[in-house]
Image (spheres, coloured by chain):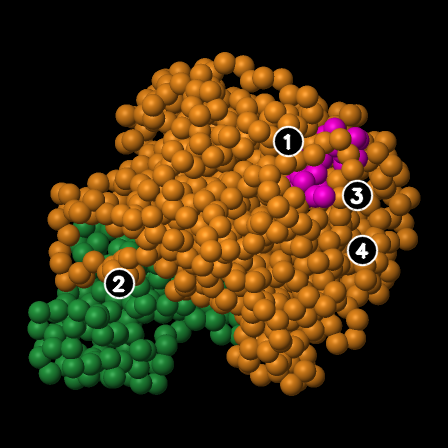
Chain colours: A orange, B green
């Protein structure tokens, strides 16, 4: 493998004869059933599924029409994630199935006439190539040198393959690039992780506090539903966000904070609640460790102190703190989800957890409930071989509090500058577009160039597929079985997914891909079934149900065994080392970090630059849906939110296209349209994440808008758990087309 | 019976689920829609507010589209629904021009199409698909002649508006504000 081998391939695949590639008719056919034709209701069928357009995994029904084609997808009324109502992405999930740009056949990187391109190959040839490379890596460096990056249901099957092969180097960017800091922040306080879906009792909350959390733009279905009910009930919403988010527009208090100063606000809120003795005395006395230390720590963190830092007036800080206390314990400081912002994120999330603790909301109605999860037996398989090392050996005690593997550390272990004994030589990337999920793309690309094998499994061409040696086309969730959805919730439940239609083109379910590859690797004993339906049926039968029953029900609900909240006369044991709520964290102290959070000033944008903020739109799941024909139609590109004063200062007009240049001189590949709006302040600009797709095979979304990830070159790593803080990047406007070559 | 839709702008998050659900349910071709979502911002930072609302055919009591239709394809039905009989529609587009809400489009198959309040679902005792999918449950549907109905109650107890009341169309889609 030579170093320049892995160019981003710019051409379409070369046909190998007989395989469907781009059928122009398909474009014309999407969704265009003759509308005048009446539907024969007796031929309509429905199949249970849970959604894979995002991680919320709502359970629902896929309806097929008289031709056996997917007609519509609706929520399952028994499902606590959707309550019978899918969000726009789930409703538009059929666009994933219908998208003519889907990956259709296995592709292998070949060199023809001095140029690298992808060639269509048979599944068998792809498997033979991959198995040979995997075995070579195993012989030369050990099986541990193969790493799996995964997201979503398909990834779970590959996880089993990796363990059977002898590697536990398995990771997902959803931890260190997203929710990791909140897990550590809450775990060091309450001894419990937050997990997904977050066990927040929005249904009963009287006061909801959102810190940069834009529910409604993040379409976390049941939370959006419950927030709406909270609005109906007249609950107080307090939103801290430099931008008037949708949630902020529905709030009693919107605190347009100066970005990167949240910890100062949180400390001042605690100062008011402690100094005015508004905290839950009985709860704190019974359960909390370190109140005196906290008191001493925050005595000078007054609202007046915080006003100078946050720009939020001391009066508003006091007023909102008192309102939170008034509604306590039914006051909920929502932990949020994507919280890797400034590198001190674990400490910010700690401060949020501590504020919840003072208000007594953990384990209380209207605060946080204790979720329960169904117990699903594992399908019998032989034991996995022992491994000689994992990513933890490479870290040698660094980020000891991280509860999951750290995707960016896997990049480090694969990079040519890795001097440790623990080197990664090959990647499987399943259902995650690492180019736009892990910041500092340049470093990721350097690591990719250093690999002996890169296999990408996805339903769509993505940026990462352009760098693959082999691309394996996974069919969409609508065309396959998968593991049951087992998620912690108010009551234990499982949801099934069965195929509603046959896989299109030559795409295959991940469980099939894994079984066939396992055969080539002589690991078939670990995958002793012919269809994944068998596995689910076996598991359901152990639980007293069956796949046949679940085809009719979709969701199986079970009784709770433990109380949902802390009961009055009960003594609750917390999972921390003291068994108490740690206002003073012994774990953090032991690892050499602040046991109580401190506010540290962060760099501010230089003259002529603006902080780059990014977020979600309700009709998209990052880049995953940018090309979805149904959802692309609702929002086909992102735009750049700019305050009118900033626009005037820079001679920008509404709708004008600009390129962005960041503090390190990186210029965006594509232009973005300016949206002049009063909804944002003067020190930052905002865009929705997931656009600016650079793979030309994405015909609908290529070059539309900007990828914020491309401009995130200043990565502030969280010293506690290795998360990648991404909100310390500053951009300026470039109005003339820059002379740079687009990578594809 | 007077069918009405009541939409609570205080709860709508502008997610556009109503648009996708309608497209699927009614097989509206990609590139067209029977409903859509509007954002209207007022004020200056930081004293700024927004209104989000899902819009569609207002099933007006005094419909310019019905009046101007040369073939009678656009017509009223029970409950005040305004519908288009596809077989009678010649696709002239007069109704598209006459609608003050821009609620109609010319379907590629040669007729004019728009929201029917999901008449086929109402006949099965179901709600319109936009109402039944909405994650925020900000949309309500019912009979204004029924004083027990949620839509009647909401209009009694909340502030509301209709769109372009000045054109005198008497819309049947109401917005809670």
Work out which quarter of the rendered image holds the N terminus of chain A and state it. Answer: top right
Spatial CA distance of label 4 from label 1 is: 43 Å
Q: Is residue A454 left or right of residue A187?
A: left
Q: At 81% from the left edge and 59% from the top edge, which residue is drawn?
A: A602
Q: Nearer the viewer, residue B108 or A233?
A: B108
Within-10-Å neighbours for mark 4: few <14, some 14–19, many 20+:
many
Q: Position of residue A591 (x, y in %)?
A: 84, 34
> In the rendered structure, the residue with mark 4 lies on which chain?
A
Q: Earlier in the sequence, mark 4 or mark 2?
A: 2
Q: Secondary structure at mark 4?
A: helix
Q: Marks 4 and 1: which is nearer the front? A: 1
Residue named by callout 1 = A145
Spatial CA distance of label 2 from label 1 is: 46 Å
Q: Secondary structure at mark 3?
A: loop
Q: Is residue A539 left or right of residue A239?
A: left
Question: Where A152 sits versus A628, above or below?
Answer: above
Q: Is residue A221 left or right of residue A149?
A: left
Residue named by callout 3 = A719
Question: Where A480 sits versus A613, above or below?
Answer: above
Q: Is residue A561 magenta?
A: no
Residue named by callout 2 = A28
Residue named by callout 4 = A264
Q: At 37% from the left edge and 59% from the top edge, which residue is drawn?
A: A629
Q: Nearer the viewer, residue A130 or A220?
A: A130
Spatial CA distance of label 3 from label 4 is: 19 Å
> In the rendered structure, the residue with mark 2 lies on which chain?
A
Q: Marks 3 and 4: which is nearer the front? A: 3
Q: Earlier in the sequence, mark 4 or mark 1?
A: 1
Q: Position of residue A273 (x, y in %)?
A: 78, 48
Q: Marks 3 and 2: which is nearer the front? A: 2
């Amino acid at each position: 493998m030579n170093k320049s081998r892995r160019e981003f391939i710019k051409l379409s695949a070369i046909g190998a004869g007989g395989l469907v590639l781009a059928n122009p008719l398909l474009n014309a056919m999407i969704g265009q059933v003759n509308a005048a034709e009446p539907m024969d209701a007796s031929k309509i069928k429905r199949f249970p599924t849970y959604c894979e357009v995002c991680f919320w995994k709502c359970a629902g029904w896929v309806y097929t029409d008289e031709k056996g084609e997917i007609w519509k997808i609706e929520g399952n009324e028994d499902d606590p994630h959707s309550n019978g109502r899918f969000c726009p992405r789930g409703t538009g999930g059929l666009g994933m199935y219908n998208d003519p740009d889907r990956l259709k056949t296995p592709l292998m990187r070949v060199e023809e006439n001095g140029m690298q391109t992808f060639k269509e190959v048979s599944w068998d040839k792809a498997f033979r190539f991959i198995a040979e490379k995997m075995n070579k890596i195993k012989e030369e460096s050990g099986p541990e040198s193969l790493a799996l990056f995964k997201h979503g249901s398909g990834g779970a099957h590959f996880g089993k393959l990796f363990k059977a092969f002898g590697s536990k180097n398995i990771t997902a960017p959803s931890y260190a690039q997203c929710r990791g800091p909140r897990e550590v922040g809450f775990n060091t306080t309450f001894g419990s992780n937050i997990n997904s879906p977050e066990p927040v009792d929005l249904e009963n909350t009287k006061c909801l506090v959102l810190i940069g959390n834009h529910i409604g733009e993040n379409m976390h279905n049941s939370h959006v539903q419950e927030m709406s009910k909270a609005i109906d009930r007249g609950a107080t919403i307090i939103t801290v966000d430099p931008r008037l988010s949708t949630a902020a527009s529905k709030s009693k208090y919107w605190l347009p904070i100066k970005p990167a100063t949240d910890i100062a606000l949180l400390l001042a809120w605690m100062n008011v609640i402690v100094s005015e003795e508004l905290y839950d005395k009985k709860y704190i006395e019974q359960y909390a460790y370190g109140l005196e230390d906290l008191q001493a720590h925050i005595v000078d963190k007054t609202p007046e102190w915080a006003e100078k830092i946050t720009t939020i007036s001391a009066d508003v800080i006091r007023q909102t703190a008192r309102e939170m206390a008034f509604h306590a314990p039914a006051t909920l400081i929502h932990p949020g989800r994507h919280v890797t912002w400034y590198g001190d994120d674990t400490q910010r999330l700690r401060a949020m957890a501590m504020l919840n603790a003072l208000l007594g909301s953990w384990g209380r109605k209207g605060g946080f409930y204790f979720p329960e999860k169904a117990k699903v037996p594992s399908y019998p398989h032989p034991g996995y071989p022992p491994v000689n090392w994992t990513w933890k050996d490479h870290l040698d005690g660094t980020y000891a509090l991280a509860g999951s593997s750290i995707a960016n550390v896997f990049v480090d272990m694969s990079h040519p500058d890795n001097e440790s004994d623990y080197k990664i030589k090959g990647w499987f990337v399943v259902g995650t577009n690492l180019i736009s999920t892990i910041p500092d793309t340049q470093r990721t690309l350097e690591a990719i160039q250093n690999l002996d094998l890169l296999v990408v499994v996805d339903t769509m061409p993505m940026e990462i597929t352009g760098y693959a040696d082999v691309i394996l086309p996974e069919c969409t969730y609508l065309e396959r079985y998968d593991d049951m959805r087992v998620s912690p919730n108010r009551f234990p439940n499982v949801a099934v997914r069965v195929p509603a239609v046959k896989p299109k083109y030559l795409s295959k379910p991940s469980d099939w891909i894994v079984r066939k590859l396992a055969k080539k690797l002589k690991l078939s004993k670990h995958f002793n079934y012919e269809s994944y339906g068998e596995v689910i049926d076996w598991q359901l039968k152990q639980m007293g149900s069956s796949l046949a029953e679940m085809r009719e029900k979709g969701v199986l609900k079970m009784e709770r065994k433990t109380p949902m909240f802390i009961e009055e006369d009960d003594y609750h044991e917390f999972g921390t080392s003291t068994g108490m709520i740690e206002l003073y964290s012994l774990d953090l102290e032991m690892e050499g970090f602040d046991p109580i959070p401190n506010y540290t000033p962060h760099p501010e944008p230089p003259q002529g630059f603006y902080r780059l903020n990014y977020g979600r739109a309700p009709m998209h799941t990052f880049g995953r849906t940018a090309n979805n024909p149904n959802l692309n139609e609702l929002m086909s590109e992102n735009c750049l939110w700019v305050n009118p004063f900033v626009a005037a200062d820079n001679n920008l007009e509404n709708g004008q296209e600009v390129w962005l240049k960041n503090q390190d001189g990186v210029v965006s590949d594509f232009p973005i349209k300016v949206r002049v709006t009063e909804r944002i302040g003067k020190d930052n600009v905002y865009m929705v994440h997931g656009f600016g797709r650079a793979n030309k095979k994405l015909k609908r979304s290529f070059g539309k808008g900007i990828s914020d990830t491309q401009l995130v070159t200043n990565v502030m790593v969280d010293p506690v758990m290795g998360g990648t803080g991404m909100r310390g990047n500053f951009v300026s406007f470039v109005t003339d087309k820059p002379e740079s070559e687009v990578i594809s | 019976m007077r069918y009405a839709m009541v939409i609570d702008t205080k709860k709508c998050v502008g997610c556009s689920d109503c648009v996708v659900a309608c497209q699927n349910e009614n097989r509206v071709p990609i590139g067209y829609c029977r409903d859509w979502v509007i954002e209207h911002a007022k004020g200056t930072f930081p004293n700024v507010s927004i209104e989000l609302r899902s819009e569609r055919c207002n099933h007006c009591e005094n419909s310019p589209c019905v009046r101007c239709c040369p073939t009678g394809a656009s017509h009223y039905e029970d409950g005040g629904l305004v519908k288009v009989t596809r077989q009678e529609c010649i696709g002239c587009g007069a109704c598209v021009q006459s609608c003050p809400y821009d609620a109609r489009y010319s379907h590629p198959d040669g007729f004019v199409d728009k929201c029917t309040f999901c008449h086929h679902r109402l006949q099965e005792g179901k709600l319109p698909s936009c109402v039944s999918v909405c994650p925020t449950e900000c949309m309500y549907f019912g009979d204004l002649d029924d004083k027990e109905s949620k839509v009647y109650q909401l209009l009694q107890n909340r502030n509301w508006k209709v769109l372009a009341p000045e054109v005198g169309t008497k819309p049947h889609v109401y917005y809670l504000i």
